[in-house]
Amino acid sequence: MEVRQMVKESNLSFCAILESHVDVGNLSKVCKSVFRNWDWTSNGGLCDKGTRIIIGWNPDVFDVMVLNQSPQVMHVQIRFKIDKKIIRELWQELSMHKVLVGNQPWIIMGDFNSALNIEDKSLGASSISAGMREFQNCVDDIEVFDINRSGLHFTWNQKPKEGVGLLKKIDRVLWNTHFVVEYPSSVAYFHPYRLSDHCPCILKIPKAEVCKRKSFKFANFLIHKPDFLDIVKRSWELNVDGVHQFRVVKKLRLLKGPLKALLFKQGNLHRKVKDLRSKLDGIQSLIDADPSNVDLRAKESSLTRDYQEASLDEERFIKQKSKVDWL
């Protein structure tokens, strides 16, 4: 009932239900109730204890083809009927799928069973665990990062019978550079979990539009980032045939995607400055009560550098944005 209401209220065109545990014998009845006139599929035939993953979609909007599946994974290809564009959704076992994706837009969403960052847990150790480190290495390897999002930060709750339970962010929506270029306005909404232990997430992908070509402009504070020169060097060393003017224009176009991805990696600059300012205030208050604490002094030094850099980025970005549109 919760899922059907969410599909109806949010006017969805695609829905993935993870860890559904629906008995295979009841699968058809449940899916007809939830998805009504939609098409749907699942990996129920491969699961021992109920269906793990159910996918439903509006056939007027998408063509969906299952490329590969296992008891824990469904790898599907999604084709937008309006503009013939293709995206892919994957869960777990991510590194092996990167080769299949190639240069296609790639979106990855689901329950990863692990936090990615220290701030993704409300309680517990303040250090990176082995599981988190493995997840971070995987994300770096497949070159994806968090999509624009809103709503709740913590997506899973422990809900103990007594006391305060643990909150964690283990559900994520990740995208690659090619998805950023094709669908830059996409955003993931994490809604309250209500009676569930997981937040429902709605991914909004704007309808296809005819893009007007823009002149080459970018957020100039990126030139101070360590990755900037390597990005420019990689694009500029690509072999492009044609006259000199065509080659320059082509390489500038090739730079737009990577530079836009680098900009998205900086996150919300205003929020970043605000968060770092708050953390720096907190550390300095602790130092005031414990002036000889070496560890606190080291954290203050690191936060000060980060805060100064973020503040400078924000100032440069605001000044440029008031003059021109970028990328």
Image (cartoon, rainbow, N blue to C red):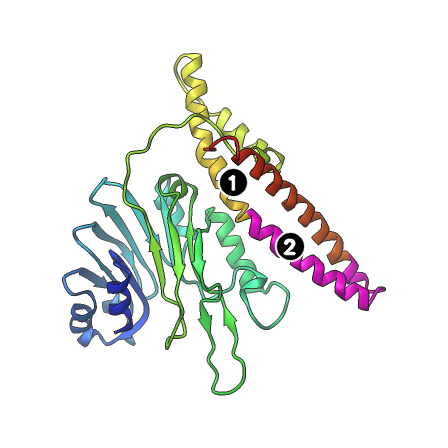
The amino acid beneath tag 2 is: Leu
Q: Is residue 149 left or right of residue 48?
A: right
Residue indicated by mark 1 = 262
Q: Residues within 10 Å of mark 1 (few under 14, many from 20)?
A: some
Task: Residue at 64% x, 54% y: name it.
Answer: 276
Q: Earlier in the sequence, mark 1 or mark 2?
A: 1
Q: Which residues are magenta?
A: 269-297
How many badges with numbers are in the image?
A: 2
User: How far across and how far down the image is residue 1, in percent?
Assistant: 25, 74
Q: Is residue 111 magenta?
A: no
Is the magenta region chiefly helix, strand or loop? helix
Res. 235 visible in picture: yes
Residue closest to the far right: 292
Circle number at residue 276:
2
Q: Is residue 291 magenta?
A: yes
The amino acid beneath tag 1 is: Leu
Res. 54 visible in picture: no
Front one among 273 and 30: 273
SS class, disc 2 = helix
Quarter the C terminus occupies: top left
User: How far across and how far down the image is residue 180, in percent?
Assistant: 41, 42
Task: Residue at 34% x, 65% y: name it.
Answer: 72
- Which callout, 1 or 2, points to the residue nearer the camera? 2
Relative height, residue 169 to residue 314 (above, below): below
Marks 1 and 2 sit apart, C-alpha to C-alpha, by 20 Å
Residue closest to the far bottom: 162
Q: Is residue 116 left or right of residue 77?
A: right
Q: Quadrant of residue 40?
A: bottom left
Task: Residue at 51% x, 63% y: name it.
Answer: 115
